[in-house]
């Protein structure tokens, strides 16, 4: 684990405009930088970078953060990976907590395996291109499959000679131990300890991680012996976990992000052929059943997946469970079945990228619609089979996490299956309750798809009495200027006017405490209480307390409050001979105005609530009492209006 002070050292060294400038073309605008947002399509720049605060904010899509969070989203890195990226760029030596002996052993093994796999990749590529056997056997095979030389080099395809120990001899001579080579999957050890090549006579397909590091290999035999498995794969290790890896993800991740969609196929050659044809957002599950970890890896890059199958109906049905995992994770899933006899590899070789894209647009169906067609088609007119098909379909619909979308699927499938909608709802609720009991260990669960109920309507005249915007402005002043000193005009017990020095935060807290006021919004209230507590403890509270807070909601709020789409240029006064007073030049008036407007809005709400209550009273005594209370509130409001009803300049 990276030490906190090292993380802070990285943050202090980062110049956010330099880091983001590697991904976004930024132009200076006064004290800030402006560019086109990389997170959504826009023609007018709304992406603001504030070097002084070290933050960015897009006023188009709302994305915000610092250099670390930008790298996490843009490059799909974890927090630790982003910190390491920045540390490397700014040449900072990170200090990390000493790992346990077990953690150190695993880390050492990962590093050793990484070195082996990189060396093995280079060796196998060299064998393919620079040996007679490699060119005659391996390279000829790839070219017969229709792979161009550029594609072969891009995917770092290789070859292992058929001599039996060619790799083992070279690797051992390089200094690798037999045990490490066996863990990496490149050799097997005989009883006498001698090594032989596990991938002998095979072409190799490197499996690369997100950063491009080779973590494992697939190897295909070129012999026609049916007793030999067509593919051998590296064993799982500290470096490679099959269920968490996707073939082609390194080459595809940029296209997946840009297109916000992933194309999922089955094998290595499917990926390579589609990539060569111009379809770059494609990955493969490498012939295994799709796993939750693989689905979540896809979800890091895109919200939608299209699964591309060959025309084998049996194969499609066997893979339906894997697609259920995609749905359960909230991905939008479509399925495209190729014509009979075609597979993605051969299909891609015969068509251009435009033809493939057009085919996918035309033939890709929503998964649940596709599944309904498939199951009902198999059931025919047999009522027992049709009922079983409906139950299976309901199992899939119940996995959809979005309740509204789930209801729409119920309506659509009820029409397709010619079944009453309520029947599907009842069946689905049984499935949901069963899953709930299994997850919670309880005997009962609430209905998840209740009957429609009308939305609650606001009381007449009560629609616009919230104080969200006033509370937000209050937090903005606190986080921006809380520690700034101001001279406030106050009255003592004898009503003598005095001038007292406060911090902006102390002044705001004092004014609100007089009426025991806290923000209504839970997030605002939590930050307000935290700020107040820190001030009472005598601590210095600055904006970095919230910009770097461990609570993500607090960080995002701070960035939002500290970002302003309009900033007055420092040259404005000199150019136009006009002085416009900035907020930080009139903090006393700004803080007082902010608090008084909030109080005024609260009074409006209290007055309206009492007026509504007055309509329900019949007792003259209670009516008189409430009327006197309302008169008092109106008097307080008139007093506040002396301040909130005027524009204070300086």
Image (tube, grey):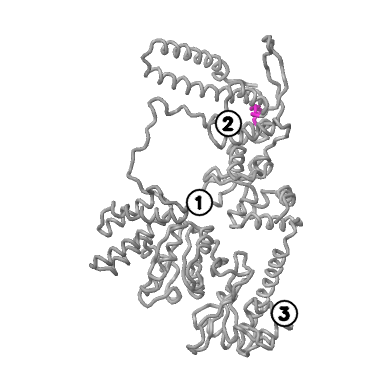
Residue 581 shown in magenta: yes
Q: Quadrant of residue 58?
A: top right
- Secondary structure character of the magenta stretch overall: loop
Residue 500 shown in magenta: no
Q: Which mark is residue 473?
A: 2
Q: Over which residues does the magenta segment extend?
A: 575-583
Labels 2 and 3 touching (C-beta < 8 A): no
Q: Nearer the viewer, residue 168 or 431?
A: 431
- Going from N to C along the chain, the mark reached first, 2 or 1, is 1
| Spatial separation of the CA atoms under disc 2 and disc 1 | 30 Å
- Going from N to C along the chain, the mark reached first, 2 or 3, is 3
Relative image position of residue 463 (x, y in whole percent): 42, 29
Relative image position of residue 169 (x, y in whole percent): 70, 86
| Residue bearing the label numbered 3 | 177
- Frontmost of labels 2 and 3 is 3
- Image quadrant occupied by the C terminus: top right
Q: Residues within 10 Å of mark 2 (few under 14, many from 20)?
A: some
| Spatial separation of the CA atoms under disc 3 and disc 1 | 52 Å
- Above or below, 261 against 65 in this view is below
Relative image position of residue 380 (x, y in whole percent): 25, 68
């Amino acid at each position: 684990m990276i030490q906190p002070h090292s993380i802070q050292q990285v943050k202090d060294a980062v110049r956010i405009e330099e880091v983001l400038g590697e991904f976004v073309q930024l132009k200076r605008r006064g004290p800030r930088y402006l560019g086109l947002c990389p997170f959504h399509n826009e023609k007018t720049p709304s992406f603001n970078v504030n070097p002084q605060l070290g933050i960015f904010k897009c006023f188009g899509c709302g994305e915000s953060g610092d250099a670390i969070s930008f790298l996490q989203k843009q490059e799909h890195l974890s927090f630790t990976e982003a910190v390491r990226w920045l540390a490397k760029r700014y040449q900072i030596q990170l200090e990390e907590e000493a790992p346990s002996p077990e953690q150190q052993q695993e880390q050492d093994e990962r590093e050793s395996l990484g070195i082996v796999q990189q060396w093995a990749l280079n060796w196998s590529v060299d064998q393919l291109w620079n040996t007679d056997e490699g060119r005659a056997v391996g390279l000829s095979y790839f070219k017969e499959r229709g792979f161009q030389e550029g594609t072969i080099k891009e995917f770092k395809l290789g070859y292992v000679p058929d001599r039996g120990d060619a790799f083992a001899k070279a690797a051992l001579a390089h200094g690798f131990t037999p045990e490490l080579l066996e863990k990496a999957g490149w050799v097997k050890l005989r009883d006498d300890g001698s090594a032989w090549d596990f991938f002998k006579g095979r072409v190799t397909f490197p499996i690369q991680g997100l950063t491009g590091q080779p973590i494992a290999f697939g190897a295909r035999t070129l012999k026609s012996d049916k007793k030999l498995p067509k593919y051998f794969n590296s064993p799982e290790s500290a470096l490679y976990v099959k269920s968490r890896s996707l073939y082609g993800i390194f080459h595809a991740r940029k296209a997946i992000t840009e297109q916000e969609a992933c194309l999922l196929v089955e094998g290595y050659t499917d990926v390579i052929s589609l990539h060569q044809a111009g379809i770059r957002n494609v990955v493969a599950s490498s012939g295994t059943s799709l796993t939750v970890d693989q689905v979540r890896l896809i979800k890091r890059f895109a919200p939608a997946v299209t699964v591309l199958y060959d025309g084998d109906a049996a194969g499609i049905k066997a893979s339906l469970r894997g697609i259920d995992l995609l749905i359960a994770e909230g991905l939008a899933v479509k399925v495209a079945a190729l014509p009979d006899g075609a597979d993605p590899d051969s299909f891609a070789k015969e068509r251009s990228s435009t033809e493939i894209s057009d085919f996918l647009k035309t033939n890709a169906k929503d998964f649940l619609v596709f599944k309904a067609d498939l199951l009902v088609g198999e059931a025919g007119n047999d009522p027992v089979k049709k009922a079983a098909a409906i139950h299976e379909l309901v199992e899939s619909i119940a996995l959809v996490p979005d309740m509204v979308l789930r209801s729409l699927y119920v309506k659509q499938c009820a029409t397709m299956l010619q079944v009453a909608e309520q029947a599907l709802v009842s069946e689905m609720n049984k499935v949901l309750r069963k899953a709930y009991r299994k997850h919670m260990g309880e005997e009962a669960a609430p209905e998840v798809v209740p009957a429609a109920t009308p939305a609650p309507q606001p009381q007449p005249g009560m629609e616009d009495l919230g104080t969200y915007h006033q509370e937000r402005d209050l937090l903005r002043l606190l986080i921006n200027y809380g520690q700034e000193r101001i001279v406030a005009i106050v009255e003592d017990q004898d009503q003598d006017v005095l001038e007292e020095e406060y911090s902006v935060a102390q002044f705001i807290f004092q004014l609100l405490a007089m009426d025991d006021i806290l923000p209504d919004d839970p997030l605002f209230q939590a930050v307000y209480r935290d700020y107040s507590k820190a001030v009472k403890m005598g601590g210095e509270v600055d904006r970095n307390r919230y910009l770097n807070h461990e609570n993500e909601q607090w960080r995002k709020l701070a960035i939002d409050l500290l970002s302003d789409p309009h900033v007055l240029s420092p040259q404005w006064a000199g150019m136009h001979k006009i002085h416009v007073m900035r907020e930080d030049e009139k903090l006393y008036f700004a803080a007082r105005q902010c608090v008084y407007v909030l109080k005024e809005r609260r009074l409006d709400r209290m007055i309206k609530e009492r007026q509504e209550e007055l309509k329900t009273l019949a007792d003259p005594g209670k009516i008189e009492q409430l009327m006197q209370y309302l008169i008092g509130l109106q008097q307080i409001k008139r007093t506040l209006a002396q301040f909130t009803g005027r524009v204070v300049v300086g």
